[in-house]
Amino acid sequence: MLHRRRTPRAFFDYADSGSYNEETLRANRVDLEALKLRQKVLVDVSARSLATTVVGQKIAAPLILAPVGLTGMQHGDGEILAARAANAAGIPYTLSTMSICSIEDVAEATAKPFWFQLYVIKDRGFSKAILDRAAEARCNALVLTVDLQVLGQRHRDIKNGMTVPPQIRIRNIIDVASKPAWAWSILKGKRKTFGNLAGQVQGMENVNSLAAWIAQQFDPALSWKDVEWIKNIWPGKLILKGILDVDDAKTAAALGADAIVVSNHGGRQLDGAPSSISMLPKVADAVGNDIEVLFDGGIRTGADILRALALGARACMIGRAYIHGLGAGGQAGVAKAIEILVKELDVAMALTGSNRVGDIGRDMIVGMEAKKPRTVKRTRKKMAE
Ligand code: GLV
Protein backbone atom coordinates (compact mmCIF):
# COMPACT_ATOMS: atom_id res chain seq x y z
CA MET A 1 0.00 0.00 0.00
CA LEU A 2 1.34 3.44 -0.96
CA HIS A 3 0.42 5.02 2.36
CA ARG A 4 2.43 2.36 4.19
CA ARG A 5 5.45 2.92 1.93
CA ARG A 6 5.41 6.71 2.12
CA THR A 7 4.73 7.35 5.80
CA PRO A 8 6.81 6.47 8.86
CA ARG A 9 5.68 3.23 10.40
CA ALA A 10 4.54 4.81 13.69
CA PHE A 11 1.97 7.00 11.92
CA PHE A 12 0.79 4.40 9.45
CA ASP A 13 0.32 1.92 12.29
CA TYR A 14 -1.46 4.51 14.41
CA ALA A 15 -4.11 4.94 11.71
CA ASP A 16 -4.27 1.29 10.76
CA SER A 17 -4.50 -0.25 14.23
CA GLY A 18 -7.42 -1.39 16.29
CA SER A 19 -7.31 -1.90 20.04
CA TYR A 20 -6.08 -5.08 21.76
CA ASN A 21 -6.73 -8.20 19.65
CA GLU A 22 -8.45 -6.17 16.93
CA GLU A 23 -11.53 -8.41 17.07
CA THR A 24 -13.92 -5.50 16.62
CA LEU A 25 -11.74 -3.97 13.90
CA ARG A 26 -12.05 -7.19 11.92
CA ALA A 27 -15.75 -7.67 12.70
CA ASN A 28 -16.52 -4.28 11.15
CA ARG A 29 -15.27 -5.51 7.77
CA VAL A 30 -16.43 -9.12 7.99
CA ASP A 31 -20.01 -8.17 8.87
CA LEU A 32 -20.23 -5.58 6.10
CA GLU A 33 -19.01 -8.03 3.49
CA ALA A 34 -21.47 -10.65 4.68
CA LEU A 35 -24.38 -8.42 3.60
CA LYS A 36 -25.22 -9.29 0.02
CA LEU A 37 -26.85 -6.77 -2.25
CA ARG A 38 -29.98 -7.56 -4.17
CA GLN A 39 -29.35 -7.14 -7.89
CA LYS A 40 -32.35 -5.48 -9.57
CA VAL A 41 -32.51 -5.20 -13.35
CA LEU A 42 -34.49 -3.26 -15.93
CA VAL A 43 -35.27 -0.34 -13.67
CA ASP A 44 -34.85 3.08 -15.30
CA VAL A 45 -31.87 4.45 -13.39
CA SER A 46 -31.03 7.25 -15.78
CA ALA A 47 -31.80 10.00 -13.26
CA ARG A 48 -29.50 9.05 -10.41
CA SER A 49 -28.50 11.51 -7.74
CA LEU A 50 -26.35 10.94 -4.69
CA ALA A 51 -27.26 14.25 -3.12
CA THR A 52 -28.83 14.31 0.31
CA THR A 53 -28.88 16.36 3.50
CA VAL A 54 -27.28 15.83 6.89
CA VAL A 55 -28.20 17.96 9.92
CA GLY A 56 -29.94 20.31 7.54
CA GLN A 57 -26.90 20.70 5.30
CA LYS A 58 -27.01 19.82 1.60
CA ILE A 59 -24.25 17.39 0.66
CA ALA A 60 -23.28 15.97 -2.72
CA ALA A 61 -23.05 12.37 -1.51
CA PRO A 62 -23.87 10.56 1.75
CA LEU A 63 -20.27 10.72 2.86
CA ILE A 64 -18.40 12.68 5.55
CA LEU A 65 -14.71 12.78 6.40
CA ALA A 66 -14.47 11.56 9.99
CA PRO A 67 -12.32 13.23 12.62
CA VAL A 68 -8.90 11.57 12.69
CA GLY A 69 -6.23 12.51 15.22
CA LEU A 70 -2.76 13.40 13.94
CA THR A 71 -3.90 13.75 10.33
CA GLY A 72 -1.15 16.32 9.79
CA MET A 73 1.44 13.68 10.64
CA GLN A 74 0.33 11.49 7.73
CA HIS A 75 1.22 14.34 5.37
CA GLY A 76 2.26 17.91 6.16
CA ASP A 77 -0.81 20.17 6.56
CA GLY A 78 -2.93 17.03 6.20
CA GLU A 79 -5.99 18.58 7.81
CA ILE A 80 -6.01 21.50 5.37
CA LEU A 81 -5.53 19.19 2.40
CA ALA A 82 -8.30 16.83 3.48
CA ALA A 83 -10.67 19.75 4.17
CA ARG A 84 -9.98 21.15 0.71
CA ALA A 85 -10.62 17.79 -0.95
CA ALA A 86 -13.90 17.44 0.97
CA ASN A 87 -14.94 20.98 0.01
CA ALA A 88 -14.27 20.28 -3.64
CA ALA A 89 -16.36 17.10 -3.45
CA GLY A 90 -19.23 18.86 -1.67
CA ILE A 91 -19.05 16.78 1.51
CA PRO A 92 -18.29 17.76 5.13
CA TYR A 93 -14.85 17.58 6.70
CA THR A 94 -14.52 17.02 10.46
CA LEU A 95 -11.47 18.43 12.21
CA SER A 96 -10.30 16.47 15.26
CA THR A 97 -9.44 18.08 18.60
CA MET A 98 -6.20 16.07 18.28
CA SER A 99 -5.28 17.60 14.94
CA ILE A 100 -1.92 19.03 13.98
CA CYS A 101 -3.26 22.08 12.11
CA SER A 102 -5.37 24.20 14.43
CA ILE A 103 -9.01 25.19 13.96
CA GLU A 104 -7.81 28.64 12.88
CA ASP A 105 -5.26 27.20 10.40
CA VAL A 106 -7.98 25.19 8.66
CA ALA A 107 -10.49 28.05 8.71
CA GLU A 108 -7.93 30.39 7.19
CA ALA A 109 -6.95 27.96 4.43
CA THR A 110 -10.43 26.85 3.38
CA ALA A 111 -13.47 28.66 2.08
CA LYS A 112 -16.37 26.54 3.35
CA PRO A 113 -17.47 25.74 6.91
CA PHE A 114 -16.20 22.48 8.38
CA TRP A 115 -17.27 20.36 11.34
CA PHE A 116 -15.34 20.26 14.59
CA GLN A 117 -14.88 17.19 16.80
CA LEU A 118 -14.56 17.62 20.55
CA TYR A 119 -12.88 15.55 23.20
CA VAL A 120 -13.82 16.78 26.64
CA ILE A 121 -10.89 17.14 28.98
CA LYS A 122 -10.86 17.73 32.72
CA ASP A 123 -10.23 21.46 32.31
CA ARG A 124 -13.76 22.53 31.31
CA GLY A 125 -12.49 26.05 30.77
CA PHE A 126 -10.43 24.70 27.88
CA SER A 127 -13.45 22.86 26.44
CA LYS A 128 -15.51 26.04 26.58
CA ALA A 129 -12.69 28.04 25.01
CA ILE A 130 -12.17 25.57 22.17
CA LEU A 131 -15.91 25.56 21.45
CA ASP A 132 -15.79 29.34 21.26
CA ARG A 133 -12.85 29.07 18.85
CA ALA A 134 -14.77 26.57 16.70
CA ALA A 135 -17.85 28.80 16.62
CA GLU A 136 -15.67 31.79 15.77
CA ALA A 137 -14.15 29.77 12.91
CA ARG A 138 -17.70 29.14 11.58
CA CYS A 139 -17.71 25.41 12.26
CA ASN A 140 -21.35 24.53 11.67
CA ALA A 141 -21.59 21.19 13.45
CA LEU A 142 -19.97 19.76 16.54
CA VAL A 143 -19.14 16.08 16.64
CA LEU A 144 -18.85 15.12 20.30
CA THR A 145 -16.97 11.83 20.63
CA VAL A 146 -18.50 9.90 23.52
CA ASP A 147 -16.64 6.58 23.39
CA LEU A 148 -13.16 7.63 24.50
CA GLN A 149 -13.14 8.56 28.16
CA VAL A 150 -10.18 6.23 28.45
CA LEU A 151 -8.06 4.97 25.58
CA GLY A 152 -8.31 1.43 24.22
CA GLN A 153 -4.71 0.28 23.97
CA ARG A 154 -3.29 -0.12 20.49
CA HIS A 155 -0.35 -2.47 20.90
CA ARG A 156 1.51 -1.21 17.86
CA ASP A 157 1.58 2.37 19.18
CA ILE A 158 3.40 1.16 22.28
CA LYS A 159 5.83 -0.91 20.25
CA ASN A 160 6.56 2.01 17.94
CA GLY A 161 6.89 4.57 20.74
CA MET A 162 4.40 6.71 18.85
CA THR A 163 4.91 10.36 19.76
CA VAL A 164 4.35 13.73 18.13
CA PRO A 165 6.75 14.75 16.72
CA PRO A 166 8.45 11.35 16.19
CA GLN A 167 10.86 10.21 18.89
CA ILE A 168 14.55 10.36 18.08
CA ARG A 169 15.41 6.69 18.16
CA ILE A 170 17.79 4.95 15.80
CA ARG A 171 14.96 2.89 14.34
CA ASN A 172 12.82 5.96 13.77
CA ILE A 173 15.65 7.93 12.22
CA ILE A 174 16.27 5.19 9.68
CA ASP A 175 12.54 4.96 8.99
CA VAL A 176 12.14 8.73 8.50
CA ALA A 177 15.30 8.92 6.37
CA SER A 178 13.73 6.46 3.96
CA LYS A 179 10.60 8.66 3.63
CA PRO A 180 12.04 11.93 2.23
CA ALA A 181 8.85 13.17 0.58
CA TRP A 182 6.99 12.74 3.87
CA ALA A 183 9.77 14.49 5.83
CA TRP A 184 9.76 17.39 3.38
CA SER A 185 5.98 17.76 3.58
CA ILE A 186 6.16 17.87 7.39
CA LEU A 187 9.03 20.35 7.35
CA LYS A 188 7.08 22.64 5.04
CA GLY A 189 3.87 22.16 7.06
CA LYS A 190 2.58 24.83 9.42
CA ARG A 191 2.93 22.81 12.61
CA LYS A 192 4.72 19.85 14.13
CA THR A 193 2.57 19.27 17.19
CA PHE A 194 -1.05 19.34 18.34
CA GLY A 195 -2.17 22.69 16.94
CA ASN A 196 -5.33 23.10 19.01
CA LEU A 197 -3.68 22.27 22.29
CA ALA A 198 -0.10 23.53 22.29
CA GLY A 199 0.25 26.32 24.80
CA GLN A 200 -3.43 26.09 25.72
CA VAL A 201 -3.65 23.24 28.17
CA GLN A 202 -1.81 23.33 31.47
CA GLY A 203 0.64 20.56 32.18
CA MET A 204 1.07 19.34 28.63
CA GLU A 205 4.35 21.08 27.86
CA ASN A 206 6.31 17.86 27.96
CA VAL A 207 3.68 15.40 26.85
CA ASN A 208 4.15 14.29 23.30
CA SER A 209 2.68 10.82 23.50
CA LEU A 210 -0.97 10.75 22.56
CA ALA A 211 -1.68 7.90 24.96
CA ALA A 212 -0.01 9.71 27.88
CA TRP A 213 -1.86 12.89 27.04
CA ILE A 214 -5.22 11.16 26.96
CA ALA A 215 -4.54 9.36 30.25
CA GLN A 216 -3.60 12.66 31.89
CA GLN A 217 -6.18 15.01 30.45
CA PHE A 218 -9.33 13.23 29.23
CA ASP A 219 -12.16 13.25 31.71
CA PRO A 220 -13.33 9.79 32.71
CA ALA A 221 -16.23 11.43 34.58
CA LEU A 222 -17.82 12.61 31.31
CA SER A 223 -21.57 11.93 31.45
CA TRP A 224 -24.90 12.79 29.86
CA LYS A 225 -24.98 15.91 32.05
CA ASP A 226 -21.97 17.21 30.13
CA VAL A 227 -23.79 16.57 26.88
CA GLU A 228 -26.56 18.85 28.13
CA TRP A 229 -23.97 21.47 29.11
CA ILE A 230 -22.41 21.33 25.66
CA LYS A 231 -25.78 21.48 23.96
CA ASN A 232 -26.48 24.66 25.90
CA ILE A 233 -23.25 26.42 25.03
CA TRP A 234 -22.76 25.24 21.42
CA PRO A 235 -24.68 27.34 18.90
CA GLY A 236 -24.65 24.89 15.96
CA LYS A 237 -25.73 21.31 15.31
CA LEU A 238 -24.72 18.63 17.80
CA ILE A 239 -23.74 15.12 16.70
CA LEU A 240 -22.86 12.39 19.22
CA LYS A 241 -20.29 9.97 17.83
CA GLY A 242 -19.71 6.55 19.33
CA ILE A 243 -23.22 5.30 20.05
CA LEU A 244 -23.52 1.52 19.79
CA ASP A 245 -26.39 0.79 22.14
CA VAL A 246 -30.12 1.24 21.67
CA ASP A 247 -30.70 2.75 25.12
CA ASP A 248 -27.88 5.24 24.61
CA ALA A 249 -29.35 6.16 21.23
CA LYS A 250 -32.71 6.83 22.88
CA THR A 251 -31.07 9.03 25.52
CA ALA A 252 -29.25 10.98 22.80
CA ALA A 253 -32.53 11.54 20.96
CA ALA A 254 -34.34 12.56 24.14
CA LEU A 255 -31.62 15.12 24.90
CA GLY A 256 -32.28 16.73 21.54
CA ALA A 257 -29.00 15.97 19.79
CA ASP A 258 -29.33 16.48 16.03
CA ALA A 259 -27.63 13.23 15.03
CA ILE A 260 -25.74 10.22 16.33
CA VAL A 261 -22.96 8.27 14.69
CA VAL A 262 -23.33 4.54 15.22
CA SER A 263 -19.68 3.74 15.76
CA ASN A 264 -17.19 1.67 17.72
CA HIS A 265 -14.41 4.14 16.88
CA GLY A 266 -13.21 2.00 14.00
CA GLY A 267 -12.48 -0.91 16.32
CA ARG A 268 -10.04 1.27 18.28
CA GLN A 269 -11.82 1.36 21.64
CA LEU A 270 -13.84 -1.49 23.22
CA ASP A 271 -12.37 -4.61 21.67
CA GLY A 272 -15.04 -7.31 21.75
CA ALA A 273 -17.81 -4.84 20.97
CA PRO A 274 -20.08 -5.85 18.08
CA SER A 275 -19.44 -4.50 14.61
CA SER A 276 -21.04 -1.14 13.90
CA ILE A 277 -23.07 -2.55 11.01
CA SER A 278 -24.60 -5.27 13.20
CA MET A 279 -25.91 -2.62 15.62
CA LEU A 280 -27.06 -0.14 12.99
CA PRO A 281 -30.51 -1.61 12.18
CA LYS A 282 -31.39 -1.98 15.86
CA VAL A 283 -30.46 1.63 16.57
CA ALA A 284 -32.18 2.89 13.41
CA ASP A 285 -35.38 1.02 14.30
CA ALA A 286 -35.37 2.51 17.79
CA VAL A 287 -34.62 6.16 17.01
CA GLY A 288 -34.61 6.58 13.23
CA ASN A 289 -37.72 8.75 13.33
CA ASP A 290 -36.43 11.00 16.08
CA ILE A 291 -32.82 11.72 15.22
CA GLU A 292 -30.54 11.42 12.21
CA VAL A 293 -28.52 8.23 12.27
CA LEU A 294 -25.04 8.33 10.76
CA PHE A 295 -22.65 5.41 10.53
CA ASP A 296 -18.98 4.57 10.60
CA GLY A 297 -16.92 1.44 10.97
CA GLY A 298 -15.21 -0.36 8.13
CA ILE A 299 -16.45 1.55 5.07
CA ARG A 300 -14.03 0.76 2.25
CA THR A 301 -16.23 0.67 -0.85
CA GLY A 302 -19.28 2.32 -2.34
CA ALA A 303 -21.15 -0.95 -1.84
CA ASP A 304 -20.41 -0.62 1.90
CA ILE A 305 -22.03 2.82 1.90
CA LEU A 306 -25.08 1.34 0.19
CA ARG A 307 -25.18 -1.45 2.81
CA ALA A 308 -25.17 1.06 5.65
CA LEU A 309 -27.80 3.24 3.99
CA ALA A 310 -29.96 0.16 3.46
CA LEU A 311 -29.77 -0.64 7.16
CA GLY A 312 -30.85 2.84 8.22
CA ALA A 313 -27.90 5.25 8.00
CA ARG A 314 -28.42 8.65 6.48
CA ALA A 315 -24.73 9.04 5.61
CA CYS A 316 -21.40 7.37 6.38
CA MET A 317 -18.19 8.67 7.86
CA ILE A 318 -14.86 7.43 6.57
CA GLY A 319 -11.58 7.56 8.45
CA ARG A 320 -8.92 5.16 7.24
CA ALA A 321 -10.39 5.14 3.72
CA TYR A 322 -9.31 8.77 3.21
CA ILE A 323 -6.25 8.75 5.46
CA HIS A 324 -4.72 6.09 3.19
CA GLY A 325 -5.33 8.45 0.27
CA LEU A 326 -3.74 11.35 2.16
CA GLY A 327 -0.64 9.35 3.09
CA ALA A 328 -0.33 8.09 -0.48
CA GLY A 329 -0.89 11.33 -2.35
CA GLY A 330 -1.80 14.38 -0.24
CA GLN A 331 -4.87 16.35 -1.32
CA ALA A 332 -5.08 14.55 -4.66
CA GLY A 333 -5.00 11.24 -2.78
CA VAL A 334 -7.95 12.24 -0.59
CA ALA A 335 -9.82 13.51 -3.65
CA LYS A 336 -9.17 10.19 -5.38
CA ALA A 337 -10.40 8.17 -2.39
CA ILE A 338 -13.63 10.21 -2.29
CA GLU A 339 -14.05 9.95 -6.06
CA ILE A 340 -13.65 6.16 -6.01
CA LEU A 341 -16.19 5.70 -3.23
CA VAL A 342 -18.70 8.03 -4.87
CA LYS A 343 -18.32 6.31 -8.23
CA GLU A 344 -18.71 2.88 -6.66
CA LEU A 345 -21.80 3.99 -4.77
CA ASP A 346 -23.29 5.36 -7.98
CA VAL A 347 -22.73 2.05 -9.78
CA ALA A 348 -24.06 0.04 -6.83
CA MET A 349 -27.17 2.23 -6.78
CA ALA A 350 -27.71 1.72 -10.50
CA LEU A 351 -27.36 -2.05 -10.27
CA THR A 352 -29.72 -2.28 -7.31
CA GLY A 353 -32.30 -0.17 -9.17
CA SER A 354 -32.06 3.02 -7.12
CA ASN A 355 -32.17 6.57 -8.40
CA ARG A 356 -31.90 8.43 -5.12
CA VAL A 357 -30.26 7.70 -1.80
CA GLY A 358 -33.74 7.96 -0.24
CA ASP A 359 -34.77 4.89 -2.31
CA ILE A 360 -32.19 2.71 -0.60
CA GLY A 361 -34.08 0.50 1.84
CA ARG A 362 -33.53 -2.64 3.85
CA ASP A 363 -35.18 -4.68 1.12
CA MET A 364 -32.00 -4.18 -0.93
CA ILE A 365 -30.16 -6.66 1.22
CA VAL A 366 -30.60 -10.31 0.27
CA GLY A 367 -32.62 -12.07 2.97
CA MET A 368 -34.28 -8.85 4.06
CA GLU A 369 -36.64 -8.53 1.07
CA ALA A 370 -39.74 -8.90 3.20
CA LYS A 371 -38.53 -6.55 5.90
CA LYS A 372 -39.95 -3.09 6.16
CA PRO A 373 -38.37 -0.48 3.92
CA ARG A 374 -36.15 2.14 5.42
CA THR A 375 -37.80 4.29 8.06
CA VAL A 376 -38.82 7.73 6.93
CA LYS A 377 -36.25 10.03 8.41
CA ARG A 378 -36.59 13.30 10.24
CA THR A 379 -40.21 13.74 11.03
CA ARG A 380 -39.30 15.82 14.04
CA LYS A 381 -40.83 19.23 13.80
CA LYS A 382 -37.64 20.92 14.91
CA MET A 383 -35.76 19.81 11.81
CA ALA A 384 -38.54 20.87 9.47
CA GLU A 385 -38.14 24.42 10.66
C1 GLV B 1 -8.15 8.81 18.99
O1 GLV B 1 -9.01 9.49 18.58
C2 GLV B 1 -7.80 7.57 18.39
O2 GLV B 1 -8.67 6.80 18.01
O3 GLV B 1 -6.58 7.36 18.28
Image (cartoon, helix red, strand yellow):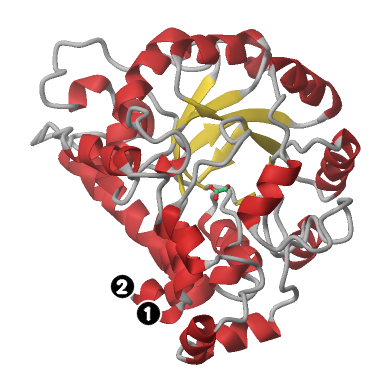
How many numbered discs sit on the rendered protein?
2
Q: Please, what is the three-letter code of the amino acid marked with disc 1?
A: Arg
Mark carried by residue 247: none
Q: Secondary structure at mark 2?
A: loop
Horizontal and vertical percent position of residue 230: 79, 26
Q: Secondary structure at mark 1?
A: helix
User: Which corner quadrant holds the C terminus?
Assistant: top right
**Is 279 rendered above or below residue 141?**
above
How packed mark 2 is, by other alpha carbons closer than 10 Å (few <14, some 14-19, many 20 or more), is: few
**Is 87 rendered above or below residue 354?**
below
Mark carried by residue 1: 2
Report whether 381 appears left or right of 26: right
Q: Residue at x 36, y 14 (%)?
A: 282
Horizontal and vertical percent position of residue 26: 28, 43
Q: Residue at x 83, y 38 (%)?
A: 127
Please tell me which residue lies in front, 203 or 28: 203
* Residue that numbered label 1 is attached to: 5
Residue 219 seen anywhere in this rendered image of the structure: yes
